[in-house]
Image: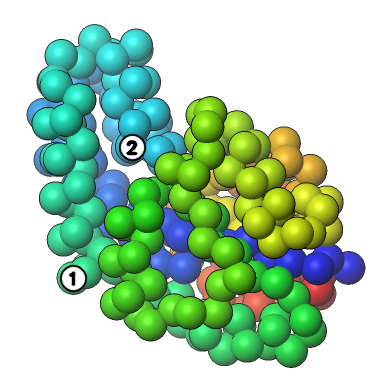
Amino acid sequence: MHDAVCFDMDGVIVNSEHHWVPLENERILPEAAPDGDVTASDVIGMHVGDIYDFLVAEHGTTMDREAFLTLYDDAAEELYTERADLLPGFEALCSALRERDASLALVSSSSHRWIRFVTDRFGLDAFDAVVSADDVEGPSKPDPFVYEYAASELDVPADACVAVEDSTHGVAAANAAAMSSVGFRWDDDHTQDLSAADVVTTGPEELRRALLDRV
């Protein structure tokens, strides 16, 4: 059994990936890398700064970094404050995990500003730690540093934590940190490869059962 649960934000706590994909494919990536064959699936789970570095290195983007970050930030504010929905039953799930004395963390590649859009909008205050890739010196997911940092913030060994992730990069990061990993899909349209997770769930009820089996 495990002592803590670390929730990714995008595609887990909120269904933002359903909105990020068209925003990235239709608005952001064509402007940032007009000559590159890059899609949202290539950058899912990555910190926005790492996305920029990836586009420069792999697709030759010449957009100014600050202009790129502003482009993403404007899209993020619209997405998180107007479009994204909270995972059905999420607050009840957190309460059930609390009843089992589990510590809870939100662990995201997004900036603290973007995280606050979500926590403020939905009144989420159940977390013992809120960790952004901004807090970590080093690369974001798929590297393990953000999850290792979250475990230290919770004062729980990483191998006593369960991470809930919707992306290939996220599952890789959790596994590399020695956490148990639960892959999560909002629905059957999910296209990310989650096969490296210890278990893959679809929908909030499967996720609830998987977590309560592990805490």
Instruction: Give the quadrant of the N terminus.
Output: bottom right
Find residue 162 and report its horizontal and vertical position in percent: 73, 59
Other-residue count near label 2 (Cα within 10 Å), few / some / many at <14 / 14–19 / ≥20: many
Residue topped by disc 1: 82
Badge 1 amino acid: Glu
Query: Residue, x 46% and y 60% (percent of image)?
Result: 9
Badge 2 amino acid: Val
Tell me where residue 214 sits by quadrant: bottom right
The residue closer to the viewer here, 41 or 178, is 178
Query: Residue, x 74% and y 89% (percent of image)?
Result: 99
Find residue 48 and report its horizontal and vertical position in percent: 33, 37
Residue topped by disc 2: 48
Q: Can you tell which mark lies on residue 150?
A: none
Q: Examine the rendered structure and indicate whether residue 215 appears above or below residue 36.
A: below
Tell me where residue 183 sits by quadrant: bottom right
Left or right relative to 160: residue 50? left
- State whether residue 114 appears in this view: yes
Where disc 1 sits, the SS reads: helix
- State whether residue 18 appears in this view: no
Query: Residue, x 66% and y 56% (percent of image)?
Result: 153
Instruction: Give the quadrant of the C terminus.
Output: bottom right
Marks 1 and 2, the one that precedes in the sequence: 2
Find residue 186 and report its horizontal and vertical position in percent: 47, 65
